[in-house]
Image (spheres, rainbow, N blue to C red):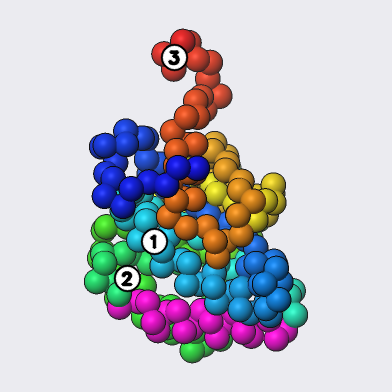
Amino acid sequence: MMAIPDNATKEQIQIVTPKHVAIIMDGNGRWAKKRGLPRNAGHRAGAENLRRIINASVEFGIEILTIYAFSTENWDRPKLEVQALMKLFARVLNKESQSLHEQGVCIHHLGELTGVNPDLTRKLHDALELTKHNERLILNVAFNYGGRSEIMHAVRQMLADGIAADDLNEELFNSYLFTKGLPDPDLVIRTSGELRISNFLIWQAAYAELYPTPVYWPDFGRDELWGAIEAYSQRNRRFGQTDEQIGKA
């Protein structure tokens, strides 16, 4: 892929920027193994890469970036790896929250915090509170998140609120999801070459464009994100309609 000049603007390159990009950040462990490093080194490299992708997202005019940071299934990983990940999340929040705030990034959490270390929970809440009024970029952090768990959580809340079956519609259901008030993702990127959605935004991504790439997450930089946006720009998004219905030849 041709590298995009650092001074290129969205207008100069004439692309269609997706409003909401979601990323399954996969391949940290394999990135580390390929280099003869421990898995945790891959996770650290992946965390460092997130800053580059946030900067590029702002540069390219993306309004919402959703990252799959830790799934409900990730608790089944080896105990020491999970502990290392929790410490890494805490360090990232300590290191990045203020700079993200100054950059105008609003941090939003997707998921549940039941069972999460209280100190980490406090750090996350502090970051959410610090950045809640920012508008330059919404950063959804899917932490202790699973798509099925989210749907079950929404159903339980609706039942607790006494929602009648006849009153239920998609708009009402959306209001009970962790992403309430936000548009669905336009583009879902998965790094490392896997071709699965892996329980990520399974309701919201119903009509998202999927972009798998063999690049491991720590190596997925500015140019790779641009390549995904470029590919998205070439897609014909029908949303179940024919070309004639949407006015395309």
Q: Quadrant of residue 124?
A: bottom left
Q: Identify the secondary structure beneath mark 3.
A: loop
Image vertical order of residue 209 relative to residue 71, above or below: above
Q: Residue at x 41, y 67 (%)?
A: 51
Seen at 46% across and 10% down, the residue is 249
Q: CA distance from mark 2 to mark 1?
A: 9 Å
- Residue 9 location (% of width, % of height): 27, 44
Label 2 sits on what residue type?
Leu
Who is closer to the viewer here, 216 or 100?
216
Residue, disc 2:
100
Residue 248 image label: 3
Q: Secondary structure at mark 1?
A: helix
Assign a secondary structure to mark 2: helix
Which callout, 2 or 3, points at the residue further toward the start of the chain? 2
Q: Which residue is mark 1?
A: 54
Q: Is residue 86 magenta?
A: yes
The region drawn magenta spans 79-98
Q: CA distance from mark 2 to mark 3?
A: 41 Å
Residue drawn at point x = 35 percent, y = 76 percent = 97
